Image: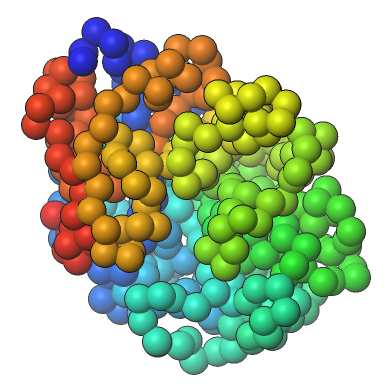
Amino acid sequence: MSSSTDILFEPFRLGTLLLPNRIVMAPMTRAFAPGGIPGQANAAYYRRRAEGGVGLILSEGTVIDRPASRNDPGIPFFHGESALAGWKGVIDAVHAAGGRMGPQLWHTGAVTSFLTEWKPDAPVESPSGLDAPGVERGVAMTDADIADTIAAFARSAAAAQQLGFDTVELHGAHGYLIDQFFWAGTNRRQDRYGGSTIKERARFAADVIAAVRAAVGPGFPVIIRLSQWKQQDYAARLATTPDEMASWLEPLVDAGADILHCSQRRFWEAEFPEIDGAQGLNFAGWAKKLTGAATISVGSVGLSGDFMSAFGGESSTAVCLDHLVERMERGEFDLIAVGRALLSDPQWAAKVRAGDAASLRGFEPAALAALV
């Protein structure tokens, strides 16, 4: 395996970020931060992946300073003295193991958690008081709410840089707050943050990115995670043509996003097969082609079955990486994020590099239940 996967182990550089290889640990919500404070167990969890040779670690979603920014009591904060001290322990442990890491900054919006019935003390908020199209929940954000939320993202990004993290990612995918602004079904606003086009509805995300860029300055890489699909609707599509995708993504790059992290349930699926066929460019491929920005692809890498099946109790077996290697050798995208395979096996990257296919593990849903 080692000779055919050499492309995965080429260095990558963007601004101040220098990675030894193209493998990214995907952000995966674990909800194992009691009181919102990451501790030694969290630091050890991430350190093991750094020791296993992952090029870049993206943290689980960690929330900004808004009254109802999380939907599970075990989701960590990325604000406040105690939480930031905990994250300092995490990044120091990762750096000691030779790794690179960025936190994923998050606001869950009006989305409910499928892991708990817990509810925050304050009303949940979203662009138009909707969890999904036609499904009311919480309150519509005021202009003041929006301004404070943008500022909170910027403060957390600045804190990440001050703590020594190597990059920062904004969670703009999967039907959470930023994505609820993108989605016409959940953004019914008639002001500057709404509109009939995806370009108009991208203004909130662009303003968040611009504020983050101003907070961290030039050179510090800013990533935004994006998706067409939503957990509320797997078939949802924000952009049905390349032109529409360009009008969605270009404002984000213009605002200061360096890397577009393009989430699919299955990375090998063509984004617009009606244009370039069943083996055509995936989401990350089109995003790179249209904007010129670096991209991360993600979606069921190295495993049978997509990640949503894991939450239904289904196992997945290890599969070969030929399709991944072929797409990366074509330069379709720059980096590849790996989720469940790294959850099951912290040494996944090292085994791939060594050509040790025989010892690659499949995925069992029980791996979701502990920090290992």
Q: How many tags in the picture?
A: 0
State the residue in front, 62 or 109.
Answer: 109
Quarter where residue 101 is shown? top left
The residue positioned farthest toward the bottom in the image shown:
121
Q: Is residue 128 above or below residue 17?
A: below
Q: Is residue 364 visible?
A: yes
Q: Position of residue 318 (x, y in %)?
A: 22, 37
Which quarter of the rendering shows the N terminus? top left
Please name the colour scheme applied to the rendered image. Answer: rainbow
Q: Is 150 placed left or right of 319 in the picture? A: right
Q: Residue at x 30, y 79 (%)?
A: 35
Q: Is residue 272 above or below residue 226?
A: above
Q: Is residue 53 visible?
A: no
Q: Is 124 placed left or right of 140 in the picture? A: left
Quarter where residue 117 is shown? bottom left
Q: Is 147 placed left or right of 39 in the picture? A: right
Q: Position of residue 134 (x, y in %)?
A: 72, 79
The residue positioned farthest toward the left in the image shown:
359
Q: Residue at x 65, y 56 (%)?
A: 236
Q: Residue at x 53, y 80 (%)?
A: 68
Q: Position of residue 280 (x, y in %)?
A: 60, 24
Q: Position of residue 161 (x, y in %)?
A: 46, 45
Which quarter of the rendering shows the C terminus? bottom left
